[in-house]
Image (spheres, coloured by chain):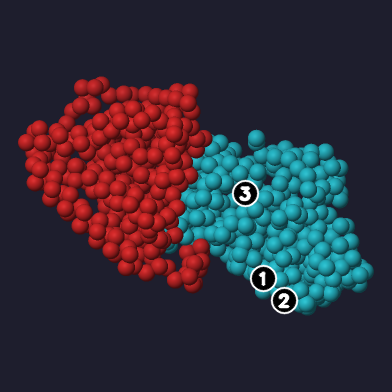
Chain colours: A red, B cyan
Amino acid sequence: MTRPTPHKANQPAHAAGDAAHRRELLREMLRIRRFEEQCVELYSASKIRGFLHLYIGEEAVAVGICQALAAEDPVVATYREHGHALARGVDMDSLMAEMYGKVTGCSRGRGGSMHIFDIGRRFYGGNAIVAGGLPLAVGMALADRMRGISRVTACFFGDGAVAEGEFHECMNLAALWDLPLLFCCENNLYAMGTALDRAQAVTDLAARAGSYGMVSWAVDGMDVTAVEQAARRAAEAVRGGGGPHFLELRTYRFRAHSMYDPDRYRDKSEIEQWKARDPITALTAQLKQDGELTDHDLDVFEKEIAAEIVQAIEAAEAADTEPLADLTTFVYSPRPT
Amino acid sequence: MNAPVAARGTPKTTRATRARQTHPQSAQPAQPADQSAKQVTYREALRAALREALIKDERVFIMGEDVGRYGGCYAVTLGLLEEFGPERIRDAPLSESAFVGAGIGAALAGMRPIVEIMTVNFSLLALDQIMNNAATLLHMSGGQLNVPLVIRMATGAGRQVAAQHSHSLEGWYAHIPGLRVVTPATLEDARGMLWTALQDPDPVLIFEHGGLYNTSGTLSPDAGPVDIDRAAIRRPGKDVTLITYGGSLRKTLAAADQLAAEDIAAEVVDLRTLRPLDDATILDSVRRTHRVVIVDEGWRSGSLSAEVCARITEQAFYDLDAPVERVCSAEVPIPYAWHLEEAALPHADAIASAARKSVG
């Protein structure tokens, strides 16, 4: 395992220190936060059904990582993927319509909250089997390497995935075949209701990835600029032929696992401690302290985001549902003639 | 968990009753008198198809356990590494879930992977990827994600390799919407189904019965792609329809021979594709013969044979002159001892008996 020295890790990455860029990072995290807060309301109103897994508290991870990706880089995510989809540029209207189960949804209402796909954004879901997306990412990276295409496949998964056999099979394959993969492990300390140290014998997840011979290190997942810096450094190395890289992003979800979860397994004090490190609050304070953000700026952000969300809800409400006659469309493709 | 190596020391099939090393096609009396037709094995027919695909489409590559340097656990890919190199004949570690999933990912990214799984029992280690991703992504993504992946695997019993290498689980896969499941039983299908499968935008699973690899017969040099949509009538007859597929075809044809000696003209239908089933060919035959025996090496309960039976009773109940008969494997894990294994599997005698009972 190779770990960067603290000095190296703290080097400012390209553009990350720029005030306008940092404001944009804040705006994007705020956009994800407000979108999901609205989703909670809509869930309570039974507009959104099924499972709803909120990313609230973890926004710095998706936003930071996506800064380092090019438009043609594939992204594979999990069932807690609203944040990744938005950060990746998936249109909020099509995301909201998907949650509503409407035909204008990115997956035509067949996927819902857990299965957001947008091939135009090279966003490959939306996988609700823990660790199930890793082999897909390995295959995409393999295809790129076989054809000499210089892309980075970014694969998001949680700490829970590290306990799965598929995780270890994929770490081995990625390292063995030296594939252009950026593994983004969102360690929020809980696999649903089971704490990491109750489930895994070795809780240093970067060390476990490192045991496969790939470059890996842990990053403060509550600090968006730290995430961005790490992601840029790792993605650049992957793109340059440095083989797979693994980032353990130490983060925390402020809400329960899903809307069904009574959240009995965590101390309230623990949640409060992590909330004190809210990535949005932290960056807001930092920008203000640096004189790079005014209350007026924030107000403008909030108003723009609120308008975008209202527009997405209105569009979803007004949208059609898939005709029942099309229930079985897309089980198979039309046969080639 | 190594699979048996047919070309390298597989238990020899010494009993005359089971070592029917002749291919169904050549067992039929009327062979085309094509002088250029070559004598080939089922294994060689599969290899020729793989080779053709690798030559014709640069997106095609083969990935699986021991497909390269070893030459394939059933020697199907023998020699391909030397011809196409290690990038395209890709040895994978023992990680069924990862390399099947990687095949799905590569297919999503525009490649045309052919993934080989040693045997159907091992495919269960990759069932998550096959079911939750390959079969599901197109529909779940609202039509955005095609998975043009081909998975080949050996299936079936008859080689004394016991309960973790001998099962016939293709019927399970035929349960899953989004998959196409094909079972080449003849040399022509071994040679021709692969290319058609590769043209399919959706995942296709090819089940090769382990007892067929060494069978041989004649194959026209211009044998090429075949359809994977329709069942085939392998032997016409008017008195009873024997429906089967894969490794049971030769047993069923042998039963038809026995019945012919008793003036019972059995029609043999080879399903070829287990999903989607070709109802039309099945029902057309049933409506002509009015009597049916279904032969399936899978277990009887909740099985492919049950599905075929249900479709016949749903759609041709009033055409039947007798209850549908089934000849399936005994409901036990396939045992090692030869006499026990033989007792567990369908045989020509049992098929003929079921047909006699049906004809009454």
Name the amino acid, label 1. Asp
**What residue is shown at x 33% (from left), y 37% (from top)?**
A254
Q: Secondary structure at mark 3?
A: strand
* Residue assigned mark 2: B284
- Residue A150's place in the image compared with A285, above or below, is below
Q: Secondary structure at mark 1?
A: helix
Q: Residue A165 versus residue B9: which sits nearer the camera?
A: A165
Q: Which mark is residue A250?
A: none
- Residue B283's place in the image compared with B332, above or below, is below
- Residue A69's place in the image compared with A276, above or below, is below
Name the amino acid, label 2. Asp
Q: Is residue A99 visible?
A: no
In this view, the residue farthest toward the left is A291
Q: Earlier in the sequence, mark 3 or mark 1?
A: 3
Q: Residues within 10 Å of mark 1 (few under 14, many from 20)?
A: some
Subunit bearing disc 2: B
| In front: label 3 or label 1 | 1
Q: Residue A101 versus residue B161: which sits nearer the camera?
A: A101
Q: Earlier in the sequence, mark 3 or mark 2?
A: 3
* Residue assigned mark 1: B279
Q: Quadrant of the N terminus of chain A?
A: top left
